Amino acid sequence: MTSLTEPEKTDLGEPTLARRLGVFDATMIVMGGIIGGGIFRNPSEVARRVHSSDLALWAWAIGGGIALIGAFVYAELAALRPRVGGQYAYLRDAYRPMVAFLYGWTLLLVVQTGGMAAAAIIFGEYFQRLTGWGIPTQVLAASTLAILAIINCIGVKAGANVQSALMITKLAAIVMLIVVGLMSPAASPQTMISAEPSAGFVGLATAMVPVLFAYGGWQTASFVSGEMRDSRRDLPRGLLIGVVGVIVLYLTVSWVCLRVLGLSALEQTQTPASDVMSGALGERGARLIALGIAVSTVGFLSQSMLTAPRVYYAMARDGVFFSAVGKLDARSRVPVVAIALQGVWAAVIALTGRFDQILNYVEAIDVLFFGLTGASLLIFRARERREGVTGDDRIRVPGHPVTTIVFVAACWAVSLTTIIHRPLSAGVGLLILLVGAVVFQFWKRSDLTVGRTVEPSGN
């Protein structure tokens, strides 16, 4: 079990990551990684794909079930491998260092930074609408990224406190939407019938793509496992509490949108949350939900700025990235260079305005690594059986290996669906991976060994 107190420095005189995060922090990070601006819009996308109220709710319920299985998988991995970098470390220990590097490579180059750029620009757009200021959207986006980077450079607790405050505000906006929806008159029965026939199983399958993407993001909480006071206990609890909380919120929001707008109107609108609020409270309601969406996007940015740099830090400690990225600030004990690198690159993408195109390149690859991480649990369990390891009291996935295999299959099914519908984008994603494989050989050292990353004392 992890000690609650660690030395400030390693035997080599280097500062260590500070263990200052608890269960509440972990829960807020998990929920903050999942809930972005999508929940305010995605109910419409799901309705358009299924043309059925029942199937729309089933899609969110099934997606929530898959996310919950994934949370159990990551909870067991966190208890089994309480390593700095989380998902990066799981991939490194289960497969080869190159697999983990390629994950971190795509995370920094496109996946995390591209998502941050997209969210920052969405925030800039809503900020302009709310204030009427003439500052260009891209400048607002880059400025927001810079401010959050500075906050997280101060220390992990400072970043976590800001993230928690934004998450609570975000939850308040969602609760406000739910309450207003419950108090509003229900749509007439006629509006619950779509103009098109139900899409059946095929429609449900295609609806799972936006649903699973909406539920994604909780895995990033594993990146800061090295800064949990007790990572074997706190991270698994935070994962499970956070994911269950999001499932309840997503199902309720989807049901409220159906109840107030009706299926036919929900299929036609691009802004279901705004429609619900403006229908009940007029322009004031529209501005309130716009503020909620703006806060939600900043919350996602804050969570990303807090978590992902720990992956680049772990890569550098493994000797496969710039050594400066693997250094901690002596006072704040956070990877300042890694945070700055991510913030600067995300700002560059935001300023160029090409984030949407870049994100399309790696959709299939991102989910592919998700499935690989789930499959790593199968590998670790098999190793334990070979080594005769028994009696571990860590949290375990219910129904393993069946449930774990279902999770992996669902992730790879989304990846395959993306490849089929966007072959060009998937091809570019593969090209990015191939370039990463070449770069890995450049950085690889002859003395590179799995698990070389310096862990905080007590693991």
Image (cartoon, grey):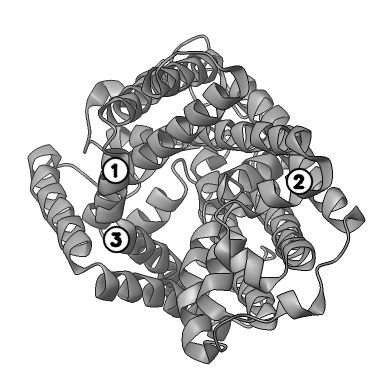
- Quickly name the residue at label 2: 277
Give the mark nearer the N terminus: 3 vs 1.
1
Secondary structure type for disc 1: helix
Residue 363 percent coordinates (x, y): 33, 59
Give the mark nearer the N terminus: 2 vs 1.
1
Say if 227 sits above or below 409 in the image: above
The residue at the point 40 percent across, 72 percent down is 414
The residue at the point 38 percent across, 24 percent down is 343
- Quickly name the residue at label 3: 365
State the CA–CA distance, disc 3 to disc 2: 37 Å
- Quickly name the residue at label 1: 110
* Farthest residue, direction right: 183
Examine the rendering and report whether any part of residue 13 can be seen: yes
Secondary structure type for disc 2: helix
Say if 152 sits above or below 361 in the image: above
Badge 3 vs badge 1, beta-carbon distance below 8 Å: no
State the CA–CA distance, disc 3 to disc 1: 11 Å
The residue at the point 49 percent across, 24 percent down is 16
228 left or right of 49?
Answer: right
Badge 2 vs badge 1, beta-carbon distance below 8 Å: no
